[in-house]
Image: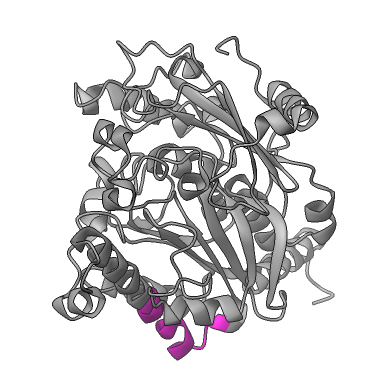
Amino acid sequence: MKFLPKLALRLLFLSMHLFCTAAEKPNIVFILSDDQAWTDYGFMGHDSIQTPHLDKLASQSIVFERGYVASPLCRPSIASIITGRFPSEHRITGNDVDGTNNREQLDRPLRKAFHEFPSFIRELTKSGYLAHQSGKWWEGSFQDAGFTHGMSRGGRHGDDGLTIGRKGNKPVTDFIDSAKAQNKPFFVWYAPFMPHTPHTPPKRLAEKYARPGRPRDVANYYAMCEWFDESCGSLLDHLDQQDLRKNTMIIYICDNGWAATSTNAADPNQKLWDGYALRSKSSPYEMGIRTPIMISWPQHTRPSRSADLAHAIDLFPTIAAAASLELPSSLKGINLLDENARKTRQAIFGVSHSVHNMTPDKPDDALQYRWCISGEWKLLLRSHGVDTTKYKNIHSWDQQPLRLYNIAKDPHEKKECAADHPETVAKLKAMIEAWHPTDKQ
């Protein structure tokens, strides 16, 4: 080796360094549930829903019981997850630009602008990862987003990718086997369209959850939660069979909450929105924005339960730290494996916009709520500047300008207490205004 020219030596050492670095990079499996309430898991204490596979994963993970998403709606929520940015930044605030009108035509420029933002997917593939997309996906095809492999061709929700889980996991397990054979680090986006509607569980599960007096929509949803759990179990078992868990980081989160219409059918306001319960999906209440977040990474994390606040925008920084990626300096999230960062965090924030209408160049036009959680307190700040003739405002029943809840004592937000705590209201409102000022009060 001493007879090699200096340049050749440098190149040799550089290639050896890059090989070692790649070999040490963790595989990353990202599991995304679709429309599931934060309460609806065995490990979160549900009295009926059984999720043994996710319960096992929880026993191997840091479980953040107080996890939150940036928006209570799938498309903007997922956009915030992969970019680490809030909807007002990446400009995807709803599921559609103009309801059902010209969806593909109006989406095209929006998607193009969105993909100019850095994402952890692109950063992973730039650093040598193979990356596979399956399941729920909104922003074009898997290639558009920077995946090297995938299922979705660019249609609504994720088209071909939506078969994953409901029709087995072979495309994903084949990808994992191929990455292993190539000795390449891999990333898996595993986002079955579950327990999202259509609620069509296998007969054995539908019958399992059927009970006298239990509404059919509730029973089918419960069954879907277990079916989703089974699909996750199949994936996790494959990682074990391939002896890959040791150097694989598994991340779990749900895109937004959901509760069956019948859970509050007696509410006279429910008739305004018959797809699901009022204070669940698309709302800033806990059943809309809260989710457990789990991180399992053997030899790097110790299984535990954490009461620290965790947020969907934290996942980019967390993945970047684990995989030694370049992190955009403008991101506001934290590395969830950094205990000091978690302990020093003062508050988290989020928004809720119109579901099927958005104006990408003026995202606040469709803004309905801003919210803040700090310690035991949560403040909802209503935006009353929405033009309801243009933007479908499904929360028109809620005209109260602000709502305060002590979510430590009242996690289901049954007692609004703003009048009893004016100083807390003033403090949290000032924090919201400093984070996201707007003239739509």
Write the residue at 53% across / 51% down: 412
Segment colored magenta = 232-245
**Residue 376 among those drawn in magenta:** no
From where the camera sits, is residue 182 visible? no
Magenta region, mostly helix, strand or loop? helix
How is the model colour-coded? one colour
Residue 343 in picture, x, y percent from top left: 82, 54
Asked whether 393 or 146 is in front, the reply is 393
User: The N terminus appears in which quarter of the rendering?
Assistant: bottom right
Asked whether 58 or 168 is in front, the reply is 58
The vertical placement of 128 against 366, above or below, is: below
Residue 144 in picture, x, y percent from top left: 37, 41
Write the residue at 39% across / 40% down: 75
Q: Disc count in the image?
A: 0
The vertical placement of 109 against 184, above or below, is: above
Residue 261 in picture, x, y percent from top left: 28, 48
Write the residue at 49% across / 14% down: 384
Residue 407 in picture, x, y percent from top left: 64, 49
Asked whether 429 or 300 is in front, the reply is 429
